[in-house]
Amino acid sequence: MKILIVKPSSFGDIVQALPCANALKQAYRGCQITWVVFDDWKLLPKICTDIDEVITWNRKENLKGFFDVLKKVRQTKYDIAIDLQGLLRSAILTKFSKSKIKIGVPGMKEFSNILIKEIYPQKSEINATLRNLETVHYLTGQSFDPKVNIKINANVDNIIKDNKILKNFIVFMPFARGKGKDWGILNYQKLSSLLKVKYADLNIVVLGSNNNYGKIKSSNVIDLCGKTNIDELASILVKSRVAVGADTGPMHLASVLSVPSVFIFGISDINETAPHIGKFSLLINEKKSKNIKSISPNMVFDEILKWIK
């Protein structure tokens, strides 16, 4: 059996969709799963051992990129195609795939449900991980616990050695799109000071993209922004004691890798986007849920201590 999954973006959304691959492997023993993903995130499905093939989509090429990926998709006759993105372009891709069965995730947008069947639309507002798994439930009549199998491929010993990172380290992943998810550089600086006073030998590693390098100006941290790809990011995360950050893709990856993860929630809908796998704490100010900066460094510090005692 050959199954196509269309979920091109973004980092965190892809992580929350990966349990579908595992559930499909359980439901259809020996099935082959192909995942369509934007170039930016291509390493993410590649480190998931339940995915057999990855088709990359160059969205920077606009229409040409779309027709290139459509051509690749149509080279194979699939038994099932699942649109987990739920947008117009992903629905068009799914619609014109050579698949016997074509379905879309609950909560499809941009009138994409006109093109393919949206299953269980009444479940559009449930947790994203569970919402994605509803597609497998619809196909099989079975329920599956969310599970992700990640293969740690990258050797990061040189990165750790070159940056003089000790075995006892935690990770900050501070950078998020949108002000509502941005806890603020000053808060991370204050948090790093609290941690160093308590644990002088604790290394604090900052992870992010190249354009974030140097943003957290503190002698308390080791800045690895721009020095890792997704494969290496995963390898560093599994060596860390705790991951700290907002509702972002790298934080969700830390959670599914069973790294204790302290999520600082702001404007995100915690009921929809909260992690569902791994070891995690969710921090949110119930009275000012949309104001992420109402969560103090001391609150985050106290939560970290619960994991590293």
Image (cartoon, rainbow, N blue to C red):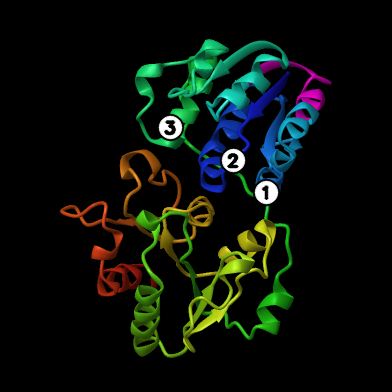
Labels 2, 3: front one = 2
* Distance between the alpha carbons at the discs numbered 1 and 2: 8 Å
| Mark 1 Cα shell of 10 Å, populated few (<14), some (14-19), many (≥20) | some
* Distance between the alpha carbons at the discs numbered 2 and 3: 17 Å
Q: Which circle's residue, 2 or 3, is located before the other in the chain?
A: 2
Closer to us: 136 or 90: 90
| Mark 2 Cα shell of 10 Å, populated few (<14), some (14-19), many (≥20) | some
Of the 4 image quadrants, the one containing the N terminus is top right
Q: Which of the numbered marks, if any, corresponds to residue 9?
A: 2
Q: Secondary structure at mark 1?
A: helix
Q: Which of the numbered marks, if any, corresponds to residue 130?
A: 3
Closer to us: 61 or 174: 61
Q: Which residues are magenta?
A: 69-81
Q: Quadrant of residue 92?
A: top right
Horizontal relation, residue 184 to residue 25: left or right: left
Looking at the rendered structure, the kind of residue marked 2 is Ser
Q: Which circle's residue, 1 or 2, is located before the other in the chain?
A: 2
Residue occupying the far left of the picture: 287
**Above or below, 92 relative to 207:** above
Task: Report if the CB atoms under discs 1 and 2 are less than 8 Å apart.
Answer: yes
